Image (cartoon, rainbow, N blue to C red):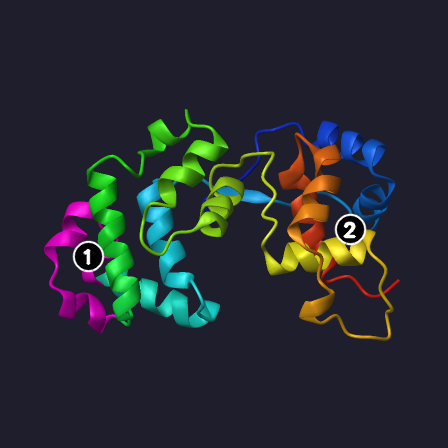
Amino acid sequence: MDTGLRPVRYDVPLALKELAATDAKLGALIDRVGPFGLRVKSAHSPFEALVEAIIYQQLHGNAAKAILGRMLALFGDIHPQPEQILAVPDERLRAVGLSRSKLLSIRDLAAKTLDGTVPSLAAIRRLSDAEIVERLSEVRGIGTWTAEMLLIFRLGRPDVFPVTDYGIRNGFLLTVGKTNPSNPIIAAMLPKSEPMERRARRWKPWRSVASWYLWRACGLPPG
């Protein structure tokens, strides 16, 4: 069955070699986790991917999946285009389970896709990471973190470091910080952005790869 996922197009063996050479602690994490397993879902347009991202925000995965399924069913089990979203009355979109806030975000996303603020799939591939974050952040409900997730998991960009992500902060602490395995990690223990960004400079141009391993660190047994 085609899952729509594909391997990243950048040089993973080179990335792993260079990351391990520049940061021994990250190299040790790479050894513990094993092969790089990130796959990207690149078939959707930025509009389609961001509709899904908005629906999934702050919801359990199963609940968000159900809402997305009902919304797609409303349009014949396919992703609607921006014009279709704007043409449907609010009450029909609310009936699939969208909150008022998410409804407004999806409508704003549709409008900004039509006016060119949100680029097409062909256009977005020509933009830098910073340009993409700047433009997508103009959409209601889309911030830096959501744009960074699109860069990593949809566009397969190799050098993204979502420094505000809870899992990244947790994984960073477990990998390069000092922790006591017998004590649970609490929010006050998580590192701030500046020291994380400072250390991550040595991971360029492969910070997406480093990020994937930091996420994996959160699921490893203590040791």
User: Which percent across, then down, holds residue 218?
Assistant: 72, 61
**Which residue extends farthest front?**
194
| 181 to the left or right of 154 | right
Count of numbered marks: 2
User: Which percent across, then down, holds residue 14?
Assistant: 73, 27
Q: 104 or 209, which is in the foreground?
A: 104
Give the residue pinned by disc 1: 75
Q: Are marks 2 and 1 in contact (CB under 8 Å)?
A: no
Q: What residue is rendered at 60% in x and 34% in y?
A: 158
Q: Which contiguous range is marked in magenta?
A: 74-96
User: Which percent across, then down, holds residue 75?
Assistant: 19, 57
Image mark for residue 144: none
| 167 to the left or right of 16 | left
Amino acid carrying label 1: it is Phe
Q: Quadrant of the C terminus?
A: bottom right
**Which residue extends farthest top?**
126
Asked where in the image residue 183 lies, by quadrant, the reply is bottom right
Q: Secondary structure at mark 2?
A: helix
User: Which percent across, then down, holds residue 129?
Assistant: 49, 33
Asked if the stretch drawn in magenta spans residue 75, the answer is yes
Give the residue pinned by disc 2: 33
